[in-house]
Amino acid sequence: MSADGPRRTAPPSSAARADPRLEQLLAHPALWRAGSAVRGAVWSSGFAPLDAGLPGGGWPRSGLIEILPMRFGQGELQLLLPALASLTRRPEARWCIWVAPPLQPFAPALAAAGVALPRLLIVSARGAAALWAFEQALGSGACDCVFAWTRHAPARHIRRLHLAAQRGNTLGVLFRTREAAREASPAMLRVALEPRGDGARVTLLKSRGGARGALDLTWATDAYEPQRMP
Amino acid sequence: MRAPKTLDLFAPEHLPRRAVRPPVQPVQPQGAPERSTRPSQAPLWLAVHLPRLAPESDSGVPRVLHSLAVRAQRFTPRISLAPPDAVLLEVRSSLHLFGGVDGLRRAMAGECAALGQPAILAFAPSASAALAGTRAGRAFTVLEAGQLAGSLAALPLAALRWPPQLIERLARIGVRTVGAALRLPRAGFAQRFGATRLAALDQLTGRAADPRERFEAPQRFRRRRELPCESDSHALLAVTLRALLEELARFLAARQSGVLALECRLWHRQAVPTRCVLRLGAPLADAARLAALLEERLRSLTLPEPVRACELRAGSPVPQPMHTGGLWRPGERGGLAAAPGVELIERLRARLGPEALETLSLVADRRPEAAWRAGPPALAPDAESQATMRAVPRPLWLLPAPRLLHQRRGLPRWHGALHLEGEPERIETGWWDGREVARDYYNARDGRGRRLWLFREREPPHRWFLHGVYG
């Protein structure tokens, strides 16, 4: 298309609200506009103030997000634990895979938080093999969520991972350190985290159609009580 | 004598030379339907006995017998193996084409001679009768059921391959031939020697049906496909292989089978063909999954030259039971795990090794290092959690082994001073298995705001260790 050829479409700013056909088109779930909430399905994060800030009201059910604590072990797993517990407890739950966790996940603590351990699969791998396993798990359609801990993840890889997560209808969570926040990333959501008392300050660095800014969360100290049949 | 390869029925040399025809109105076995659409439906069995095969070699089917059965497939599709030393052919409808009984006998003897085996051939309307005849060394030809009893009468009982003790018992009452056995009263015979023996005699004379297991020649898939041009492009190779694998999937689907081994050969202009062998844990018949696994394998190959053609050879098909659909949705109580999960786990295991994947379960033990166990993933996980835990806060991460901390003035340090919080929790147990622990666990916070889990030994050096991170 040449630059000086006639423009067939009017500039969207003026005609967007007037044209009913455009309104009809925008009702399609695959289309979204910057500034409006993403209409995709979400998992509740388990923290009401965070849900209010997240686009759509929770963690996205498909797509890649990044959690960026200052250092490993500053509450980044606590942030996802309530969602993980409710997700794995569903009767139709799929796998939840952790790729290359930096330490040994402590099963009693996870069970006490309400995570259904039989749904949890730990994959140990290093470097490129870890990224490969992450992409396979995201794209397989067999997982509800896949967590991965990695140091080096170039932007083009993150783009692939995001597409794989959408293909597999899976929530992918990439844990990286805060230095990664300087790099651009195609992830849907980037959440920075710093410890604060018995909780953390959560900053939404990038959220498509959600609020920006920081909010303080307090971790639940009382353990999960499993509901018993009478 | 070579049988005609093509079906040119009008060539004069292929017309039957002698008027050996199936009887127009065959003797129907009792109870068989009177009205039959085709008159010559009564079977005629040709037994081929290879006397050189030792009768006691009962370790499966001998190879010679197997290859004879494969060769005999040009005479009839209805072939049955009678191990260890005979093959049975149902030839009623083949008589006309192969020149009658004599022509068929000559052609079959030629096949046996090609295998280097002398053979005894007998025709009879019952498979057992033909078999017994050849095993007794009588190459008789009985075309009608009515003549069967007369031809069998003189056969020794040993031809039936009954147990020697039984034959001895019969010999003691003066019964040495099949004819003598047939003359015994039926009820008494069944009572003294068993109903199965009476049934065997009935099968011999054609009174009872004699079902035989049909021989199916093993079929192997082997296809070759030329590439449109010489190439070492992985994408072109993958497309060509995908087409071959789809053919393989159709081949397997028609047989309700899967393969356990697959060999892919890549042909070059000069170099020897590159071989790539894929071995599977369970029979597989799905083209997409085979392609994914094969491509995974091909990616690790280095090609000496561009590829001209690829060839796919499959191992023998393994029958696969058809899957039963589940009543429950995957993951529901009693429901199987979703199939994609199995596929994913298979793929991850293939690349990372079987020990790279594990699931966790709880163990009722107060010692943190013994309170959990890692195991291989269950493909159909049970949604019920085994144990319920006491509501004690525990860190989400455990160090692989407790890490010794420096201390200053009796207080632990790790990247700076640590601030201890709350009351200690004493864990003192495990005296029974030699891994006794006596520790006071503390929660602590480091300079970066992380919550840690430390313990102090109760024994005299009172060292401090880091054991967990709250995460």
Image: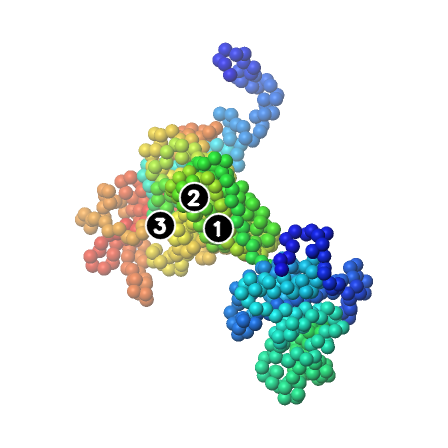
Q: What residue did someone put label 2 on?
A: B298
Q: Are marks 2 and 3 on the same chain?
A: no
Amino acid type indicated by mark 2: Leu
Q: What is the secondary structure assignment of the residue under circle 1? A: strand
Write down the chain letter for disc 1: B
Where B178 sits versus B20, above or below? below
- Going 56% across and 45% down the picture, which residue do you hit? B247
- Locate residue B404 relative to residue B191 in the image: left or right: left
Report x, y in % for residue A178.
Answer: 33, 34
The residues tagged by marks 2 and 3 sit, at their Cα atoms, a distance apart of 34 Å
Q: SS at mark 3?
A: strand
Percent of width and height locating residue A156: 40, 32
Distance, label 2 to label 1, CA atoms, is 13 Å
Q: Which residue is mark 1?
A: B262
Which chain is indicated by disc 2? B
Q: Which residue is mark 3?
A: A104
Is residue A62 visible to us here? no
The three-letter code of the residue at mark 3 reads: Gln
Between residue B311 and residue A184, name the one nearer to us. Answer: B311
Quadrant assignment for the N terminus of chain B: bottom right
Q: Nearer the viewer, mark 2 or mark 3?
A: 2
Could you classify mark 1 by the number of other residues whose Cα lies within 10 Å: few (under 14), some (14-19), or many (20 or more)? some
Q: Along the line of sight, which residue is nearer the eye, B27 or B24?
A: B24
